[in-house]
Amino acid sequence: MVQTFFQVENLKKYFPIRGGILGREMGVVRAVDDVTFSIKKGETLGLVGESGCGKSTTGRALLRLIEPTAGRISFEGKEITSLSQEEMRKMRRDMQMVFQDPFASLNPRHTVERILEEPLIVHGIGDRKERKKRVRELLDVVGLTAYHAKRYPHQFSGGQRQRIVIARALALNPKLIIADEPVSALDVSIQAQVLNLLQDLQKEFQLTYLFIAHDLSVVKHISDRVGVMYLGRLIELAEKKILYQYPRHPYTQALLSSVPFPDPDYKKERIILQGDVPSPANVPQGCAFHTRCSLVMERCKTQRPELKESGPGHFVACHLYDKI
Amino acid sequence: MEKIPFHAFVHESTRKDRSDQSFLKITIKRFCMNKLAVIGFLALVVIIFGSLFAPFLVSHNPAAQNLMERLQPPSSMHWFGTDEYGRDIFSRVFYGARVSLLVGFASVLGGIFVGTMIGAMAGFYGGWVDNILMRMVDLVNAFPSIFLLITIVTLLEPSLTNIVIVFILLGWTGTARLVRGEFLKIRQEEYIWAAKSIGMSNLRIMLFHMLPNAIGPIIVAATLGVGGVILAESGLSFLGLGIQPPTPSWGNMLQGAQSLSIMVMAPWYPFFPGLMILITVLAFNFVGDGLRDAMDPKLDGRR
């Protein structure tokens, strides 16, 4: 590997909790706490975790929609964390985002044509005629037709809206797309279409995806590699097949055992976790998971496990695998 | 998950479009269903039309005095009677509408402009920018406004321009608060994240994405505001601090009718300007309320 396509090192995003009349800092919410990973060109990296574990914040911090507290993010060898606002604005051509809620991520006052044309206007691409042509192309690519252009978002169904959101993300020919729960708000039947569309587009335009979701089967369907997050930390990262067959981290094991299997006769071992996820404002010392882990050891309570390679391409942050 | 052929789902789009209508059309339609609002709107159209075309509608010069015809009751010659200098009240009421409406619209437009800019900055940037701007709002609001109005107008001379400036200086705070609140809310919408992720500048996001979505409450506040300013200007003129005679305004006509003897001898003199103030302010309030209801998506299909 000459250079990593997209590299994230020690990304942190802390939100201060302010209180009192003077707005003193009372504490911090560690939404993203020391996350490190990389994405290879053309692959799909899935990111799973429960709600509130920092997946979406990670996605937004990567594009600097939320300014990260600390950490380095580099894209094609170029460090983007140190770019000025204006340089960052230009970088956004290459990195786009698909949002979770297609009912909220389209401006209700703009027609589809305006929505799709705007990225081109903002980055000064083409003249009026070329832009209109591009809008029709984009609609075609995502399976809508040119006559949809004059309509408003409220006149579309959820699946169609998500296609518009995807078309907008594609308008600038990006290299990386961060998809933040792109199908969670859709009906299951529509989910499949949108996932297929994303896969088709990936092949056609050599896209790289960071796919954020809480639905394990969706992530399994689309990803090449999968990362698991818990309380703002990345706890396991591996090839999809390896992760789903041989999960190492006790949390991943519990998470995977919760996936329903469509066979009523199939009896399986279900690992039920005790207790609730601790508040990210008050993360337990040591391993964040130790309060709920069945295999907890003494050192888990004091020492935070690093994300280490415990098998070929299989990274896990757990003291159980330290010997290897 | 099975791979599903792409074209199998294109028919998703053929569901009946229940509305091919823009937001504007829906709003107008719903506004028209509110009777009071429509009546208010028609009243405003008549008053605005009357004031614009006042020279063609009235037969008397509003400033022409005729001491032979002082305090005449309404007649076919003087529809609303005459005042203590024998001036035609009907003409003066319509010329007065010009002044009152001009002060109302100019003050509110100015106040909305200033308030929207300040509120937008505060709501968009938040943090210390918000803090400073909102403390400015508190500062202006902390002054007793009538007292401040009277002081400023007394220090400056009470001309139309000065009165409008004073109303703007005092009137922008409400809009600023309103717009800030709307912007704080809209800032968290996903389409604003989307706009940022596309690489739009902050100014563009504010102008093209946030402002159009905040415009509803601003229009409502402006409409209600015009009524308020007309009332305030009348009050100021009544105290002799507003528009100075001989230029007629509803307020200074009332001032002319202040004395008990006139009120007893010529009750029509204070009645007509007072009635105009009442109708106009009510009309603006009805229209404002109607607009608010018409633009509120939550009230869909209730009326």
Image: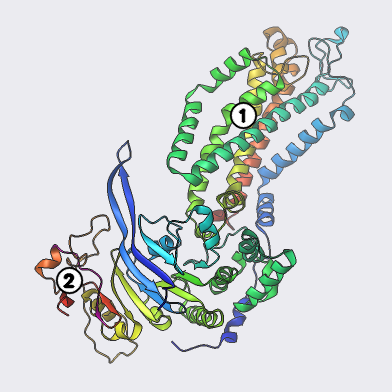
Give the structural element (helix, strand or loop) at label 1. Answer: helix
Say if the magenta span includes residue A296.
Answer: no
Residue at image position (48%, 66%) is: A101
The amino acid sitting under disc 1 is Ile
- Horizontally, residue B142 falls left or right of residue A71, namely right
- Which labelled disc corresponds to residue A175? none
Location of residue A109 with respect to B270 vertically, above or below: below
Q: Chain under label 1? A: B
- Which labelled disc corresponds to residue B168? 1
Residue at image position (69%, 33%) is: B105
In the image shown, does B302 or A269 lie closer to the viewer?
A269
Quadrant housing the N terminus of chain A: bottom left
Task: Please provide percent x and percent y for residue B283.
Answer: 68, 36
Residue beneath disc 2 = A293
- Which numbered disc, 1 or 2, marks the residue closer to the eye? 2
Q: Main secondary structure of the magenta part?
A: loop
Q: Chain under label 2? A: A
Residue at image position (64%, 78%) is: A140
